[in-house]
Every structure is written in structure tokens, then in C-alpha cells.
Amino acid sequence: MLKKAAGGETSGMRGGRLRKPPDMDMAPLIDCVFLLLIFFMVATTFAPLPGLRVKLPPPGKPSAEKPKGLLMRIVNPEPGEKEGVMVLNDEIVAMHEVLGKFLNTPVHLKNMLIIQAERQVLHEQIVKVMDIAKRSGIDKIGFAMVARGP
């Protein structure tokens, strides 16, 4: 039973005042969470993604010497075509023939593949050729530029 106290307050069975529920301040908890987040962001290391090493031609004048190894020329695709014509050491090859040609190449020529693609060739075709070259055991891949006429 509740009795009315002299000051107008109600008292419970123990004779004390009614208590308010305690307030919880969330600010320190949020600070700790942000500090942990910052700690884990700073302490995390990311493994580098494996990639291909590509030997780019040096800037300046193009060299007149013929490169040693395989030379894959890819010409611009014809209108309506997805892929350009590929010429491997003066022999036209299709994409499904490239792996066999790379595998049957003599070892002394297999040390490097040089890809010479024209401007409109899609990167997809170049990457496919690079993947096939890696599968066939060619470790070094370089790019050659086509000299523009005046």
C-alpha cells in the first residue's frame, strides 16, 4: 500500500522514494567503438594482388631493330566484328589456334612475347592473348607501338 508522505511524495513498501530508472550515456561506448574501428583499419595489411609484369617500350623514338621472340600483331577489327585479325610472326592465326602455336614454338623464341595492337583493338582480346601466353609458359610479355604516319 502506498502512503502519502508529508511532502506530498508517495513512498513504497520500504518507506523510500520512488526511484527513476538510471540513464545510460552512450557517448563513451560510441567513442570506444570508433577507436576500435580506427585501430583495426590502421593495423590491417592487404596482400598485393598477383599481376603480370609488362615491359613497356621506353619513351622517345621507336627503335628500328627487330625484337627477339614472338611478335603478335593485332589489327583493328572490321566494322561489326568483335576481334581484330591476329598475325603471329607473319602468319595469320585465330584465337583458338594461338595456344597450339605458342606451345609448338621453339624454346629460344619462347622467352618473350611482344604484342603490337592497333588503337581500336579491345582490351579483352589483348588480355586473352596474354592469358594464353602465360598458360603456354611465356613469362615475359612486352608491348610495341605502331608508328603513326604523318
Image (spheres, rainbow, N blue to C red):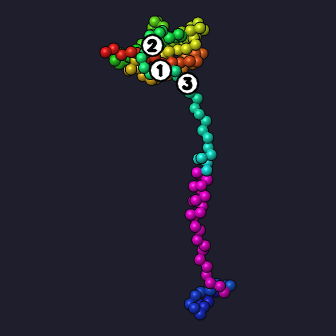
Q: Which mark is residue 52?
A: 3
User: Which segment did they paint magenta?
Assistant: 15-38
Q: Which mark is residue 133?
A: none
Q: Which amino acid does the dot numbered 3 rest on?
A: Leu
Q: Residue at x 55, y 24 (%)?
A: 52
Residue 34, image quadrant: bottom right
Q: CA distance from mark 2 to mark 1?
A: 10 Å
Q: Residue at x 34, y 18 (%)?
A: 79
Quadrant of the drawing holding the C terminus = top left
Q: Is residue 28 magenta?
A: yes
Q: Which residue is label 2 attached to?
A: 63
Of residue 14 and residue 113, the one placed in the foreground of this image is: 113
Q: Residue furthest bottom?
A: 6
Q: Position of residue 47 (x, y in %)?
A: 61, 36
Q: Please indicate whether residue 15 sits to the left or right of residue 77 in the image.
A: right
**Mark 2 vs mark 1: which is more N-terminal?**
1
SS assignment at label 3: loop
